Image: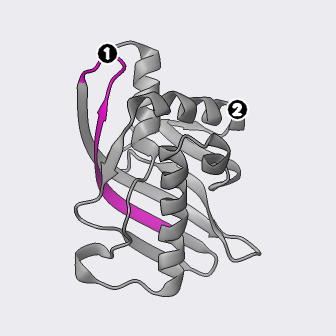
Amino acid sequence: MNAKFNQVMAVVLGLYFTNTAIASKGNTMNSEQQNVIKTINNMTAAFHQQHIDEVMQSYTEGAVIMFEPNQAINDADEIKAMFQGAFQLNPNFTYPKGHQVVISNDTALHIAPWIMKGTAPDGQAIEQSGLSVAVLQKQDDGKWLLVIDNPHGQISAN
């Protein structure tokens, strides 16, 4: 596969797609934890509708996304292009083990094992899995936004 396709796949893996907010293994979430999940859900809905501006509004200015392991990107134009490239895969993410959200003051850590199914431009079915790890920050208006987004949390740096 070519490098561009690999970049697009990495973007897709960075997205958090879910329709329900569930706590890991039956634990219930408080309202702030649910608000963190709401940010994830809103970004997901925007992605599914291919509304790139709404996707980008889920992130703080200067946010960092690890579209590939050990390669952080914080350039807004490059991030936007990567997300737009991912639209062509029509990915569907599920979180069979739920979500874990830990909050300290105005900082939240979101962890979720994921499974992604999609379709490559050549029609080939794609299925991958991993561990998403994201840091969110509570804004002055009470809204939570993504600051660091790493869908490759299971991969250690060399």
Secondary structure character of the magenta stretch overall: strand
Q: Which mark is residue 122?
A: 1
Residue 155, how many percent across, how many down? 33, 43
Tell whether 24 sits left or right of 110: left
Position of residue 150 in the picture relative to residue 125 (left or right): right
| Segment colored magenta | 109-124
Residue that extends furthest to the top in the rendered view of this protein: 2
Vertical arrangement, residue 5 with respect to residue 36, above or below: above
Residue 123 in magenta stretch: yes
Task: Find disc 2 in the rendering and name its residue.
Answer: 77
- Residue at image x 31%, y 15%? 122
Image label count = 2
Under mark 1, the amino acid is: Asp
Q: Residues within 10 Å of mark 2 (few under 14, many from 20)?
A: few
Q: Sequence order check: which comes first, mark 1 or mark 2?
A: 2
Residue at (46% x, 26% y) in the render: 7
